[in-house]
């Protein structure tokens, strides 16, 4: 009977052990045969795994060896000065390990053996996918727009990290593969990632193009992942992980441990070894493929655009001769405005021309501008702006100081007079040009701009523009802050617990977040809403949606404002004029457009050096609305 029991123990051990053994090791087996352990996540963050013994032998001679493999195909330094597999050994009842890579797949192999007798062991394997959401905190040192460096050796492959002896691009490739070198890799400060490839990128045989050539991007490596793709940058570990099927850096085919072949599925994640230069403008990425193969990519960061010399708000100079026409450049002998015109045509002299930092341009005309017979108004007079010269154009500008030219792009966008285009004075609003180029001279102080444009024959128009002074107080143009919580309501001042907008509302309600609230130096106020704003059931729209502004909350109000810094109040006077939401007035939320108030007073606080405006207003009961505006 004793021999039978011994035989049973031997059979059990054979079933449990991964290494051969002899039955003479019965005493050792009696210890390890009863051993078991779990591999589990230890903490709420999910970044630490633990090997936990469920049965601990009485003599404590068990040693655990834990191999965490190569997550995402990346060799991680093991603390011994090399990049062999990360292996930890312990004789305690538990071993724990924090994952060095964010957003990676780990294959963890644990072997439990007797101290000094490693041939007596049991083994378990466990796979963990550890994903870290992108850090929403702005200020990532790697955030920005990157491109392959336009130089020889910007990308290459070879038998080892940093070795590109198998292939690297030449100087000529920068030109012949320009569709690759103009691809943009956009790493947002919010952790978002985008492949911006344009109409063409470089295509290879695995994508169905032989010979390789420029062509339309192929799914899923065509930027279609942009809506959901993200990245994590670990400066300490020197890694950059791009998350999103089809999202990549450098070449689409290069993934961890391989190069994609025709028909293969793109992975959901790729991790690169990342080296960022001290100045933050150069980035080198290395990634192992198959065998000894390593690809290397060298990127350069797009420099932020230099501030435009024209950036700001301009208007026609309020003086005689600010605009005129004559038989030659700078000759206004045929006609020029008089001093009295500054008053009689005040609806023209208060028009503003806004040059934004992002290259966009706006005609901000208010409720009235100067209209002429070619627009159907005879005699000429102040009146509501007429489409497309009404400020609704989606327009841009390009100022070339060297060439001395200023070009406005956008049908209906203009400077000075709407009728004046290159080579003509148009006879109807339907003749509006898509683009107008002016000869431009900017004064040394940057506050005066002289424009000239040839019309027909010898005719030339001249316009003199002056730049608005730097706003003080609330003066200037404001919009709702493009962020979550920019507007909300709750049971008390600064309390938006009942409702506040989400991040996604900035996009779905873009027609609200692009509305402008303009406080002019002369005390006048304008709601500049464009062709669409956000409409709600009280305005006749259910469900709520973007649509044409509804009178009187459509920007047509002749309004003024009073800012009392000491009292912390801001009052808007004018039926239909408002800040934030049109329905919100003192003591109520109106139920119909006809209930518009003649005056609304907000509690106001300026922060961020005067560039952020916090507004609060009590409605009904305990209800308070809050709005956060930022200066444009």
Image: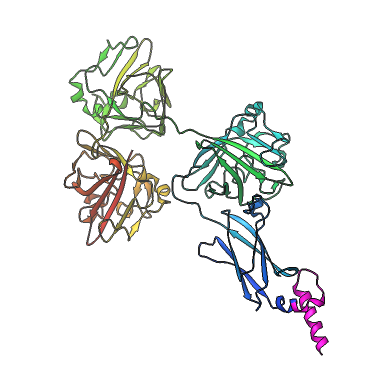
Q: At 50% across and 34% down in the image, what residue appears?
A: 302
- Extent of the magenta region: 1-27
Residue situated in front as seen by the camera: 194 or 59: 59
Horizontally, is 326 left or right of 242 in the view?
Answer: left
Res. 577 visible in picture: yes
Question: Residue 282 or 133: which is nearer the viewer?
Answer: 282
- Residue 317 image offset from top left, x and y in percent: 25, 22
Q: Vertically, is 587 above or below 159?
A: below
Residue 360 placement (x, y as % from top left): 40, 33
- Quarter of the image holding residue 8? bottom right
| 394 or 444: nearer the viewer | 444
Work out which quarter of the rendered image holds the C terminus and state it.
top left
Q: Position of residue 228 (x, y in %)?
A: 53, 50
Q: Is residue 176 above or below residue 251?
A: above
Q: Vertical placement of 403 versus 6: above or below?
A: above
x then y, percent, for residue 138: 44, 46
Residue 22 is a magenta residue = yes
Q: Is residue 420 magenta?
A: no
């Amino acid at each position: 009977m004793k021999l039978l029991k011994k035989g049973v123990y031997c059979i059990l051990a054979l079933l449990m052990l991964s290494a051969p053994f002899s039955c003479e090791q019965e005493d050792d087996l009696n210890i390890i045969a009863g051993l078991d352990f779990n591999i589990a996540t230890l903490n709420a963050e999910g970044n630490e795994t633990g090997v936990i013994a469920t049965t601990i032998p009485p003599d404590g001679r068990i040693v655990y060896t834990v191999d965490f493999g190569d997550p995402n195909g990346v060799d991680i330094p093991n603390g011994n000065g090399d990049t062999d597999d990360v292996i930890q050994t312990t004789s305690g009842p538990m071993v724990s390990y924090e994952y060095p890579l964010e957003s990676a797949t780990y294959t963890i192999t644990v072997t439990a053996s007797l101290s000094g007798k490693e041939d007596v062991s049991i083994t378990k394997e466990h796979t963990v996918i550890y994903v870290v959401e992108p850090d929403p905190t702005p200020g990532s040192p790697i955030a920005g727009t990157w491109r392959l460096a336009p130089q020889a050796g910007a990308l290459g492959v070879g038998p080892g990290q940093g070795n590109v002896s198998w292939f690297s691009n030449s100087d000529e490739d920068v030109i012949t593969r320009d569709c690759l070198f103009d691809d943009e890799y956009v790493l947002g400060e919010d952790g978002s990632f985008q492949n911006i490839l344009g109409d063409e990128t470089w295509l290879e045989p695995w994508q169905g193009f032989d010979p390789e050539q420029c062509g339309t991007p192929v799914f899923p490596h065509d930027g279609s992942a942009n809506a959901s793709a993200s990245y994590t940058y670990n400066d300490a570990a020197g890694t950059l992980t791009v998350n999103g099927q089809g999202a990549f850096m450098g070449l689409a085919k290069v993934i961890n441990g391989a190069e994609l072949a025709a028909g293969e599925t793109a992975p959901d994640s790729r991790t690169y070894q990342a080296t960022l230069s001290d100045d933050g403008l150069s980035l080198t990425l290395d990634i192992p493929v198959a065998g000894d193969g390593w690809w290397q990519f060298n990127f350069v960061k797009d420099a932020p655009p230099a501030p435009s010399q024209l950036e700001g708000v301009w208007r026609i100079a309020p003086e005689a001769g600010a605009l005129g026409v004559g038989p030659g450049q700078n000759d206004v002998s045929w006609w020029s405005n008089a001093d009295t015109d500054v008053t009689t045509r005040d609806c023209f002299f208060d028009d503003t021309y806004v040059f934004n930092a992002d290259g966009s341009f706006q005609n901000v005309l208010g409720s009235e501008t100067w209209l002429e017979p070619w627009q159907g108004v005879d005699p000429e007079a102040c009146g509501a702006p007429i489409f497309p010269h009404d400020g609704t154009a989606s327009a841009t500008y390009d100022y070339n100081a060297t060439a001395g030219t200023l070009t406005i792009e956008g049908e209906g966008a203009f400077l000075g007079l709407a009728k004046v285009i290159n080579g003509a004075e148009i006879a109807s609003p339907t003749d509006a040009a898509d683009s107008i180029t002016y000869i431009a001279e900017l004064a040394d102080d940057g506050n005066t701009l002289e424009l000239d444009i040839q019309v027909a024959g010898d005719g030339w128009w001249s316009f003199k523009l002056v730049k608005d002074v730097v706003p003080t107080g609330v003066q200037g143009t404001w919009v709702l802050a493009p962020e979550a919580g920019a507007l909300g309501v709750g049971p008390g001042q600064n309390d938006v617990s009942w409702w506040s907008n989400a991040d996604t509302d900035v996009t779905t309600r873009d027609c609200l977040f692009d509305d402008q609230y303009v406080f002019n130096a002369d005390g006048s106020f304008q709601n500049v809403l464009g062709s669409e704003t956000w409409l709600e059931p009280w305005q006749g729209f259910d469900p709520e949606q973007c649509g044409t502004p509804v009178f009187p909350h459509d920007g047509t109000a002749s309004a003024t404002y009073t800012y009392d810094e000491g009292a912390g109040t801001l009052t808007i006077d004018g039926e239909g004029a408002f800040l934030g939401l049109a329905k919100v007035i003192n003591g109520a939320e109106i139920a119909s457009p006809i209930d518009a108030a003649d005056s609304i007073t907000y509690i106001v606080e300026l922060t961020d050096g005067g560039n952020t405006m916090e507004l609060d207003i009590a409605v009904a009961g305990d209800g308070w609305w809050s709005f956060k505006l930022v200066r444009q």
